[in-house]
Amino acid sequence: MSVTIAPEATTPPSATPGGPASTTRSAAAARERTADLEQLIVQNPGAYRVLTGDRPTGALHLGHLLGTVANRVRLQNLGVEMFLIVADYQVITDRDDAGDLPATVREVLLDYLAAGIDPECTTIFTHSAVPALNQLLLPFLSLVTVAELERNPTVKAESEAAAERGGRGTSGLLFTYPVHQAADILFCHGNLVPVGEDQLPHLEATRTVARRFNQRYSAAQPYFPEPDALIAQSPTILGSDGGKMSKSRGNALELRATEDETVAFFRRAKTDADRAITYEPERRPEIANLLQIGAYFTGTSPQALADEVGSAGAGRLKTLVTEAVTEGLRPLRARRRELAATGSRHLAEVLARGNAHANAIADRTLDDVRDLMGMRY
Ligand code: TRP
């Protein structure tokens, strides 16, 4: 199966072929496809365009780095073209107060650049600066039903989480956000989206939108690709309380944290009552988490690290992991401080360039879409 896109062309790139068999995908199928894709990417990185991103709710943390950011840097360095969306409109899907967005966006940018995202090859842009992307939401919304949105597991989960946090009802923007994400991905003909397995329903929504658009308006030659999920191999990183690391839980180790804060974070980290260290992710999630973090930064496997620590126990493990993280993040933190010290001009320029590039592409896509829909007057 060949996936080709012509990023700069105004003529529709050939969309992902697939037919009915590829339209609904189980997690197992997506995992299998991911293994194939990993090989195809190495052979021909130029055939792929990745769209991914984050909602700017705070500085990035260790969970972001190990979960997504390191993988993005890897793909970028393999030569895959990447669009990185700072999804500012998504911040207000489930809260009234977006906080100090300029400050937050700046922190996220600093984290991206310090982690190795290179704005010379990766386009970093914000939702709100690309009107044509957002306008794609209108035709796309016509392609899905309310019932489908109601069934979307991520919309359900996000609505429940929002209700727990503030008792706020599901906003229209939250309700439609799988379709907004379809616009995020399809405006630039993204054909590869790195996701966690729990995000697969989202991508399925994007594939559905692309397929229906093609069927309705561009049957002779599919205009939008049906993007593939690239399932992250990385484990979910836990915070100091044993729950999934997240800004909103207050259990995160931010990348920008000081060495003292790093030491304190791991001192607080939960362990369990067993003396000997073993790698048993199901039975001993907190220990497994420390092993995974330590292994990542020392370039070994969690199992090997567990064998190394063995009967020396959790205290020894924490010391090792703290040292590994402190050492491992030192260059990133140094780059981050340097970038922060150069002032905001550089960051503003990076974003302005990214936004201009994203706008040029979004304008072309919206133009094509108007043509295909017979809205040329
Ligand atoms: N929802 C993602 C997050 O919360 C950010 C995002 C917005 C995104 N649009 C996207 C991710 C499109 C992948 C594809 O972090």
Image (cartoon, rainbow, N blue to C red):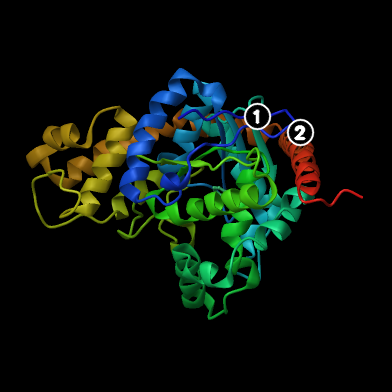
Secondary element type, mark 1: loop
Secondary element type, mark 2: helix
Query: In this view of the protein, which residue sits in the foreground, 259 or 52?
Result: 52
Which residue is farthest front? 220
Residue under the image location 41 percent in, 46 percent down? 21
Query: In this view of the protein, which residue sits in the foreground, 369 or 358?
Result: 369
Q: Point out residue 222 in the picture as x, y percentages from the top left corner.
A: 63, 40
Does ligand 1 reach within 8 Å of label 2's beta carbon? no
Q: Judge from the rendering whether residue 197 lies leftward or rightward of residue 317; answer left or right.
A: right
Q: Residues within 10 Å of mark 2 (few under 14, many from 20)?
A: some
| Amino acid of disc 1 | Pro
Residue 353 is marked as: 2
Q: Point out residue 345 in the picture as x, y percentages from the top left corner.
A: 77, 35
Looking at the image, is 261 positioned above or below residue 73? below
Q: Which residue is mark 1?
A: 119
Q: Point out residue 356 in the picture as x, y percentages from the top left corner.
A: 79, 37
The CA distance from mark 2 to mark 1 is: 9 Å
Task: Check the picture and name the quadrant holding the N terminus.
Answer: top left
| Amino acid of disc 2 | Arg
The quarter of the displayed image where residue 362 is located: top right
Which residue is farthest top? 43
Residue under the image location 48 percent in, 65 percent down? 152
